[in-house]
Image (cartoon, rainbow, N blue to C red):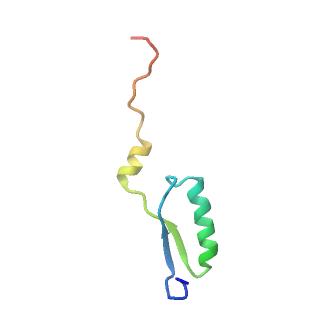
């Protein structure tokens, strides 16, 4: 219905941080939207990307000093 109204670009909200679930949803949305439409995941913010790729700050609980 949206494509009939002239919409050709669709953006999906991330629900799995770009993981497998998001990729499956993206594929289904692309199929449903058709070849003439562009479907993509929302852009990841720089803060979210930094948090995901930052090294862990927790100390190891090895019991050694």
- In the picture shown, does residue 23 fall above or below 53? below
- Residue found 44% across the figure and 19% down from its top: 61
Q: Residue furthest front?
A: 1
User: Can you give x and y, in whole percent of width and height, for residue 27 in the image?
Assistant: 62, 66
State which quarter of the image contains the N terminus.
bottom right
Q: Quadrant of residue 60?
A: top left
Q: How many discs appear?
A: 0
User: Can you give x and y, in whole percent of width and height, for residue 41 in the image?
Assistant: 50, 64
State which quarter of the image contains the C terminus.
top left
- In the picture shown, does residue 6 fall above or below 61? below
User: Can you give x and y, in whole percent of width and height, for residue 39 in the image?
Assistant: 53, 72
Relative side of 46 to 32, left or right? left
Looking at the picture, tell me which residue is in the foreground, 50 or 34: 34
Relative side of 57 to 23, left or right? left
- Residue found 39% across the figure and 28% down from its top: 58
- In the picture shown, does residue 55 fall above or below 10? above
Q: Quadrant of residue 43?
A: bottom left
- Residue found 59% across the figure and 63% down from its top: 25
């Amino acid at each position: 219905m949206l494509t009939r109204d002239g919409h050709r670009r669709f953006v999906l909200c991330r629900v799995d941080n770009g993981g497998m679930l998001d990729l499956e949803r993206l594929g289904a949305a692309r199929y449903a939207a058709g070849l003439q439409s562009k479907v993509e995941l929302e852009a990841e913010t720089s803060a979210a990307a930094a948090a995901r790729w930052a090294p862990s700050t927790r100390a190891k609980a090895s019991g050694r000093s």
